[in-house]
């Protein structure tokens, strides 16, 4: 089930990506609509992070091409924002929350130029949106997992982009933060921003996303959530492991583990 | 007066190393710094042999090229050969350094450097190598000018590239996504480390350069959570170890380079004890601790 759209905001054509000659993404061909909240779903090692990274030209493509806004990514980096997986950086780095959020402005500043007052205001405003305005000068090493994720999100908002890519923004955050973040993402998409999110938890997919991409090295499905998020397609994505997976997920949901910080997904 | 020149040269070198060291520590690349400091040796000797003089410009170029070459080789063996980074570093720098040692030993007649000074530095002789103009005016030791120029280059580099260096260090993926090349800034930084090494060679020698690159920066890392302050503290520790090192050496009548590195180690030890105690106080005192280490939402 691969649904193509008219005037796509992202067009991925025959994309193959390999690490050490071993293909991680195989012949991905899809188009994505503007102004939607889009989920990328698939098991561990399915290539979800790699799909985002190759769209952004952070890892080399073996074949195929990607276009955004009908242009080459190199020409429109300004309009695109990327939130890497939280564990991809060192949170003991000597920096304050404000320092990190200001990095979101670096792309808009030229070489040599320092962030100005206006940039600072944008940064503070972004922190307000994620409820972290009181943590401006807090050292990032003193943040909880959920707070770290919100700082990353604020940094991304500070980029004032039109298209957002987020790699597992809900990994290791508490339920309250997750709710706040998804609320924000929904507001962004109603402002006609497009948000692409790598997501792990099958339970919340139907509530969160307008559009779903099911991935396991190959593209299994890409379409509106009600058409693409079906039992057969999920089974194809997760192989036989799906029943096990949903059972575990159900269990987790029933018990609602008090400390989800420990459950960090890779 | 001699003491003044020696301490000044030592400080200039230590500040350059301290500033760059902050980036190496945070990038977890201090061993690459060590590797570069050794691999520039053949570059310096070749520059001597080709230019036939002790001019600093060819030396800086020779060292810069070799430093970047060794960085490239380390990456190459790691990426293409699937060799672990530390092994790749070990192979590359010992090999290049060995070539340098052979060059020095077989051309000692023609090259005005000897093995001892390459390995252990010659900072004690700094005041003897004066820059005297054609009119006979004494401008002071040449080393001071070389170290001073290098420090100026390093400060300009960090000042101009402050945000690029910061973001490529903290979050390489984001910086590429923003269009800031991590590769370019990696090699620029390694080039900067290479030319700094040249200035350090004159003073502390190849073996102890790494102490100047790593110790002040690590000390600063323990003492602050603010990157800008880390740069200042690291530079300050550099000055401190030059002073301390000089007087320790005079007192013990021993090697100045050795005493500088030793002083650095002592300062690091004190900073370590201080930062551990601070952590303990924060942990045992719940009122300040809850404020400072508030890990809950
Ligand atoms: N830098 C890398 N070098 C080699 N293999 C990698 C690298 N990054 C990811 N992989 C491999 O590619 C596959 C897909 O990884 P990834 O895109 O991170 O999956 P996901 O995000 O869906 O969990 C995995 O098998 C992983 O081991
Ligand atoms: Mg991933």
Image (spheres, grey):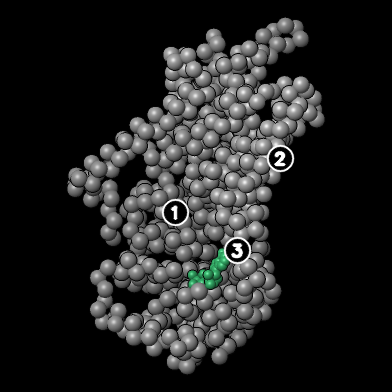
- Chain ID for label 3? A
Q: Is mark 2 within 8 Å of ligand 1?
A: no
Residue A219: x and y in percent read 57, 83
Query: Is disc 3 on the same chain as disc 1?
Result: yes
Is mark 1 in CB contact (under 8 Å) with mark 2? no
Residue at screen point 57% across, 20% down:
B123
The residue mark sitting in front, 1 or 2, is: 2
Which of the 4 image quadrants contains residue B69?
Answer: top right
Which residue bears the numbered disc 1?
A90
Give left or right: position of B133 versus B147. Answer: right
Residue at screen point 25% across, 78% down:
A255
Which of disc 3 and disc 1 is earlier in sequence? 3
Residue B216: x and y in percent read 46, 33
The residue mark sitting in front, 2 or 3, is: 2
Which residue bears the numbered disc 2?
B65
- Vertical position of residue A237 compared to residue B164: above or below: below
Q: Secondary structure at mark 3?
A: loop
Q: Secondary structure at mark 2?
A: helix
Residue at screen point 49% across, 51% down:
B170
- Chain ID for label 1? A
């Amino acid at each position: 089930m691969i649904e193509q759209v008219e005037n796509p905001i992202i067009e991925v054509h025959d994309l193959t990506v390999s690490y050490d000659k071993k293909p991680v993404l195989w012949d991905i061909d899809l188009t994505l609509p503007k102004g939607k909240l889009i989920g990328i779903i698939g098991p561990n090692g399915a290539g979800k992070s790699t799909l985002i990274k190759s769209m952004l030209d952070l890892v080399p493509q073996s074949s195929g091409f990607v276009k955004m806004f009908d242009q080459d990514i190199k020409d429109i980096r300004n309009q695109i924002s990327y939130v890497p997986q939280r564990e991809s950086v060192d949170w003991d780095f000597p920096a304050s929350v404000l320092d990190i959020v200001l990095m979101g402005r670096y792309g808009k500043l030229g070489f040599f130029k320092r962030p100005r007052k206006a940039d600072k205001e944008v940064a503070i405003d972004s922190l307000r949106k994620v409820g972290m305005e009181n943590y401006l000068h807090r050292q990032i090493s003193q943040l909880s997992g959920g707070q770290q994720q919100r700082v990353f999100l604020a940094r991304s908002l500070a980029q004032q982009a039109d298209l957002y890519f987020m790699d597992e923004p809900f990994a290791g955050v508490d339920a309250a933060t997750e709710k706040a973040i998804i609320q924000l993402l929904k507001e962004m998409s109603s402002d006609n921003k497009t948000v692409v999110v790598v997501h792990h938890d099958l339970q919340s997919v139907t509530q969160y996303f307008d559009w779903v991409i099911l991935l396991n090295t190959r593209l299994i499905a890409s379409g509106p959530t009600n058409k693409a998020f079906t039992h057969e397609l999920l089974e194809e994505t997760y192989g036989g492991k799906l029943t096990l997976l949903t059972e575990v997920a159900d269990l987790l949901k029933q018990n609602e583990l008090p400390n989800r910080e420990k459950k960090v997904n890779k | 007066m001699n003491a003044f020149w020696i301490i000044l040269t030592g400080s200039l070198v230590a500040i350059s190393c301290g500033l760059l060291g902050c980036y190496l520590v945070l990038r977890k690349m201090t061993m690459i710094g060590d590797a570069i400091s050794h691999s520039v040796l053949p570059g310096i000797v070749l520059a001597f042999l080709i230019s036939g003089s002790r001019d600093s410009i060819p030396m800086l170029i020779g060292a810069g090229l070799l430093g970047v070459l060794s960085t490239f080789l380390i990456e190459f063996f790691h990426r293409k050969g699937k060799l672990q980074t530390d092994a790749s570093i070990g192979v590359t720098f010992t090999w290049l350094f060995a070539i340098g040692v052979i060059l020095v030993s077989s051309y000692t007649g023609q090259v005005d450097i000897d093995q001892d000074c390459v390995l252990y530095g010659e900072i004690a002789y700094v005041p003897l190598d004066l820059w005297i103009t054609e009119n006979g005016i004494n401008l002071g030791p040449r080393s001071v000018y070389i170290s001073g120029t290098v420090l100026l280059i390093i400060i300009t580099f960090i000042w101009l590239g402050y945000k690029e260096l910061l973001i490529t260090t903290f979050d390489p993926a984001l910086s590429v996504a923003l269009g800031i090349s991590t590769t370019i800034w990696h090699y620029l930084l390694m080039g900067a480390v290479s030319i700094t090494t040249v200035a350090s060679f004159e003073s502390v020698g190849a073996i102890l350069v790494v102490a100047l690159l790593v110790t002040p920066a690590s000390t600063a890392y323990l003492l602050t959570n603010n990157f800008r302050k880390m740069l200042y503290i690291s530079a300050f520790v550099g000055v401190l170890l030059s002073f301390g090192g000089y007087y320790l050496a005079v007192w013990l009548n021993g090697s100045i380079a050795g005493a500088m590195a030793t002083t650095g180690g002592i300062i690091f030890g004190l900073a370590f004890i201080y930062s551990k105690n601070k952590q303990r106080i924060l942990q045992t005192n719940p009122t300040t601790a809850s404020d400072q280490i508030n890990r809950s939402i």
